[in-house]
Image: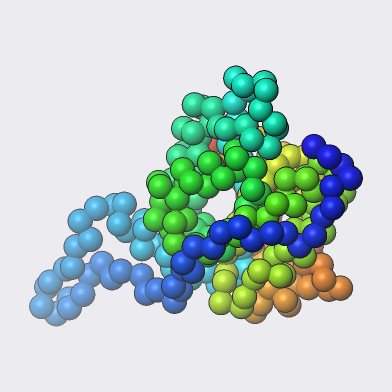
Amino acid sequence: MNASATVGVGTCLSTSKPLSIGLTPVPICLLRRRRRCLMIGAETEVELAASEAQPASRRLILLRHAKSSWQHPSLRDHDRPLSKTGRVDAVTVSRKLQRMGWIPQLILCSDALRTRETLNIMQEEARGFLEAEVHFISSYYSIAAMDGQTAEHLQRTICHYSRDELFTIMCMGHNRGWEEAASMFTGASVELKTCNAALLEAPGKSWEEKAMHSALDISQTHVRRIEVCDLHKIMLFRGFM
């Protein structure tokens, strides 16, 4: 990647229909006096209703793309597709995020082919990802190769695209920048393998409330929780209560 590439706020290549928020969780039992129970019928629908419940705080998902293929050495790095393993992993992580209730309302994604393919698979697997507003940010690809630059750039783009009614945002990109950003936001060492996500949660009435001189104040003293969502387990990395 070209380390001298110009980095701006980013380029919006595509926007999908915004997610309608403020959904009420589906009730399980109603009218007890009549001894009637409204059954959902499947655990998956119960999980979906829980995942659509509006979170009480601001959530940030930093997701690294799924594993890419090296079978075509003539391709530019930007244009490498996912491997078969990467496609399976993208399905797995989308299911896990949905079960946890971490469904983004806004997705900011690198325009590299492997990140776009990761997102496409996640959208096919989980309805919530398909309903999110999406922007493809060309600078996410180049900024990840620049030492110490990714965190501030993510802060700027989040402030630029976010709105108060959006509670969960996902940024999809590359190492080494994504690991650096997650570590800087939390004051802890965070490792992100392919298709792993750092899940950050902090109180706040708006994303702008986190802004100080155009930088989000997601810091060691403000982050309530950080977890690493990998393909096989959810590991509590560090907690702030």
Q: Position of residue 101 (x, y in %)?
A: 47, 58
Query: In the image, what residue occupies the spot 82% across and 71% down?
Result: 214
Is residue 72 visible in the rendered image? The answer is yes
Query: In the image, what residue occupies the spot 66% across and 49% down?
Result: 110
Query: In the image, what residue occupies the spot 11% across and 73% down?
Result: 35
Image label count: 0
Figure check: 90 above or below 69: below
Q: Position of residue 12 (x, y in %)?
A: 64, 61
Figure check: 70 above or below 47: above
Figure check: 194 above or below 152: above
Of 168 and 226, nearer the camera is 168
Residue 83 position by quadrant: top right
Q: In this view, does 68 lie to the left or right of 191?
A: left
Q: Is residue 38 left or right of residue 97?
A: left
Q: Give the residue at the far left of this rendering.
A: 34
Is residue 240 visible in the rendered image? The answer is no
Locate the C terminus by quadrant: bottom right
Of 96 and 120, nearer the camera is 120
Query: In the image, what residue occupies the spot 75% across and 52% down?
Result: 139
Locate the N terminus by quadrant: top right
